[in-house]
Amino acid sequence: MISMRIGYFSGAFGDLPFKKAMEALARIGYDGVELCTWKGYPADLDTLSKEGWKKIEETAGELGLMIPAVGHGSIDCSSSTEARRGGVERTYRNVDFAATVGARVVDVTTGMAPPGMPEADAWRFLTEGLSECADYAMARGCVLGLEPHINTIIDAPDKVLRAIDAVRSKALGVNLDASHFAVLGFDVLSCTRELARYTVHTHLKDTRGRYPSHEFLIPGEGAFPTLAFIKTLREVGYDGFITAEVAGMRRQMPGYQPVPAAQIAYETVFKAFRELGLR
């Protein structure tokens, strides 16, 4: 029985207090929330105590919201040993946070290789970092969701598969944000099928245009094939969260309001769920 659920990435709320943001999500009808751990946000791992971690879990639970994922860590390909170590250590903290609040997935992205760095070195740094973090996640009952992302070393399906093949860990999967494939001109549904067996989580953004003259938008505002994307995930047996996300590009546009944005995103995903018989 496929039981996909609707989630939201809390980074879309900016610095709005956590409880107010979660109350809005519960009121709208979301099933869960992915906790944004970026610097400056309410769940910033550099400022939030472990007591604060538990309080977040309690608040979400009281509101009936699941926490399927936290995000995100970043595995650095920098030539700086210190920078690479910092990325690994922060991912460790994301894993610890996830284990504390009952989340299974820790989303991770990768950096871009510095100009002039040989590709072999960049991939060696990448796979070493991912391997170390995957081992740490496995020991704590979590998995990493590697997110393909424009302007990083992992920006295409074949590169995702290359990283997974190099690391060879059951604790490394894919956080499938196919919006990045869409703006690069890939066939979204083919990519979804290609990565299906490794997909442990999703992000859903809308899109308009092609990179680098693209826009990332609130689900429902653009041309991304939301219904077909979710239908394809259903067909390949994915039963996790469809997690709506609002990228920084959209949040910086004039007139952006976080709660109405969450409402628009929910209505878009809910409509697709209803058409597919998932609600």
Image (cartoon, helix red, strand yellow):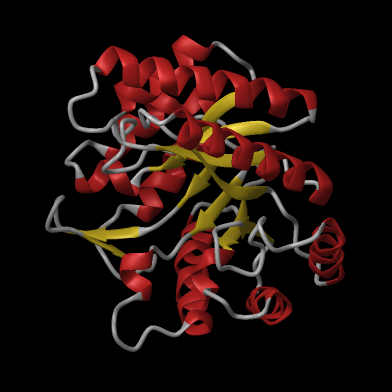
Residue that appears at 44% across and 44% down: 231
Of residues 108 and 191, the one nearer the viewer is: 108
Q: Is any part of residue 189 visible from this angle?
A: yes
Left or right of 2? Residue 225 is: left
Q: Quadrant of residue 145?
A: top right
Q: Is residue 13 above or below residue 89?
A: below
Of residues 259 and 75, the one nearer the viewer is: 75
Q: Is residue 148 above or below residue 179?
A: above
Image position, residue 7 (x, y; %): 60, 59
Q: Is residue 69 above or below residue 35?
A: above
Location of the N terminus by quadrant is top right
Residue that appears at 80% across and 51% down: 101
Location of the C terminus by quadrant is bottom right
Q: Is residue 129 above or below residue 88?
A: above
Left or right of 98? Residue 255 is: left
Image position, residue 169 (x, y; %): 60, 15
Residue that appears at 53% across and 38% down: 87
